[in-house]
Image (tube, rainbow, N blue to C red):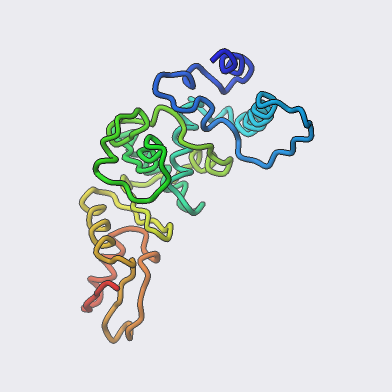
Amino acid sequence: KTYLGQLINKYWFLTDEILAEGIMYPLEGYLYPETYFVTDEEASIEDITETMLDQTDEILSERRDDIEAIHQFLSLSSVVESESLFKKDRPKIAGVFINRLNADMPLQSDITVLYALQEKRVAVTNADLQVDSQYNTYKKTGLPIGPVCMASAGTMDDVLNYEKSDYYYFFAKEDGSVVYSETYEEHQKVVDFLNECQFERVILVGPEFAGLSASFEHYENVKEVEAMLAAHPVQHCCV
């Protein structure tokens, strides 16, 4: 704790928030992911830590004027980083989370639950959602108590330049593609449909499609899917 206090005094972006009760790893989200070449055979863990923090300082200083609250910014950026597989989705996902924060809605990020459990997997159970942790954004409204990973500079920029929309929900499929929804009802349609379609593909049956299959990844929200199906008097089944 003494050493962390020294780091807080040295680096402008470190605050007492990293020492708050409930924080699992004080420097989580502050050690920038990069390839570091350490040539000093006697380099200490403190030397390496400060080399990484120096890099974080460089990255954050370039964006300092645009960041209002650094700990909260890194916390949000870390969730966006972990929730998105493709860069194109990050501004949209950031926008969804910001919409939810502005509406005083819980973020309900599975990533924060898994971080609280210190597990790496995809499926999250109802029992998992009950974990008593300030990282759990199903039980805690607002951001997690701290970052759940270190966000890249690109993700930070995507959060700063998030895409404005009316979306409050998104569903990430196993292939990493994302479907966005404005309401819970729309979101639940997506979840139910994809849970029914185990392999997340739709076979479109009708002369217009001649047995061709169309992947759900072509559609970014449930309204587009419904419009496509309504426009053609065809049957669809899951495979």
Q: Quadrant of residue 226?
A: bottom left
Residue at figure coordinates x 74%, y 38% from the top left: 37
Q: Position of 106 compared to 178: left or right?
A: left
Can residue 56 be seen at all in this image of the molecule?
yes
Q: Position of 89 compared to 132: left or right?
A: right
Q: Is residue 47 above or below residue 161?
A: above
Residue at figure coordinates x 24%, y 43% from the top left: 126
Question: x and y percent of residue 142 in the render?
Answer: 34, 30
- Which residue is nearer to you in this view: 38 or 136? 38
Q: Position of 73 compared to 9: left or right?
A: left
Question: x and y percent of residue 56 in the render?
Answer: 62, 31
Number of numbered markers: 0
Residue at figure coordinates x 24%, y 74% from the top left: 237
Question: x and y percent of residue 145 in the render?
Answer: 40, 27
If the image is split into quadrants, where does the C terminus sit? bottom left
Check the image and name the residue furthest to the front. 42
Q: Is residue 19 above or below residue 142?
A: above
Can residue 68 be seen at all in this image of the molecule?
no
Question: x and y percent of residue 157 in the render?
Answer: 54, 41
- Which residue is nearer to you in this view: 50 or 211? 50
Residue at figure coordinates x 39%, y 56% from the top left: 178
